[in-house]
Image (cartoon, helix red, strand yellow):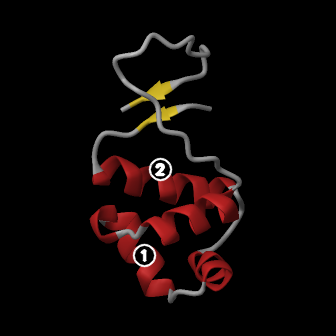
């Protein structure tokens, strides 16, 4: 599924939902990327302090792929796309 993220709050919501969909607890997710459970909790509330390294690690742990698209370019978007 494609998600268009425009705010850190939307990213936080996506991270929490993706972790749950991957079947991981906050403790398991934290262990996979080498941070504390409280850090995962904080990022799922406010992702504004998320580092790129942590974002990429979380994407890997949750089975996500990060892509950056030019929002002004016309792109064929699948019907399952979710935009915030």
Question: At 68% across and 79% down in the image, what residue appears?
Answer: 32
Q: Where is residue 78 in the image (x, y as percent from the top left)?
A: 61, 16
Residue at 48% in and 27% down: 82
Inter-mark Cα distance, 2 to 1: 13 Å
Q: Is mark 2 on a helix, strand or loop?
A: helix
In-front residue for pair 42/34: 34
Q: Give the structural element (helix, strand or loop) at label 1.
A: helix
- The quadrant the C terminus occupies is top left
Q: How many labels does the image show?
A: 2
Above/below status of 49 relative to 30: above
Q: Residue 14 carries which label?
A: 2
- Give me the residue at 56% from left, 15% from top: 77
Q: In this view, does 72 lie above or below 9?
A: above
Residue position for label 1: 41
Query: Residue 59's x, y, as percent?
Result: 61, 58
Determine contact: label 2, label 1, CB under 8 Å. no
Residues packed near mark 1 inside 10 Å, few (<14), some (14 to 19) or many (20 plus)? some
- Classify residue 30 as left or right of residue 44: right
**Pick the front one: 41 or 11:** 11
Query: Residue 66: x, y in percent?
Result: 56, 47
Quadrant housing the N terminus: top right
Rendered location of residue 6, percent (x, y):
30, 39
Left or right side of 39 for 19: right
- Relative placement, left or right, of 18 versus 5 is right
77 up-or-down from 14: above or below: above
Q: Looking at the image, which is closer to me, 73 or 34?
A: 73
Q: Callout 2: 10 Å neighbours few (<14), some, many (20+)?
A: some
Q: In which quarter of the view is residue 71 placed?
A: top left
Mark number for residue 65? none
The tag earlier along the polypeptide, 2 or 1, is 2
């Amino acid at each position: 599924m494609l998600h268009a993220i425009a705010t850190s709050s939307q990213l936080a919501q996506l991270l929490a939902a993706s972790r749950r969909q991957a079947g991981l607890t906050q403790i398991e997710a934290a262990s996979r990327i080498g941070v504390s459970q409280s850090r995962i909790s904080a990022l799922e509330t406010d992702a504004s302090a998320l580092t790129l390294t942590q974002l990429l690690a979380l994407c890997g742990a949750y089975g996500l792929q990060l892509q950056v698209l030019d929002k002004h370019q016309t792109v064929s978007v699948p019907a399952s796309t979710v935009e915030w």
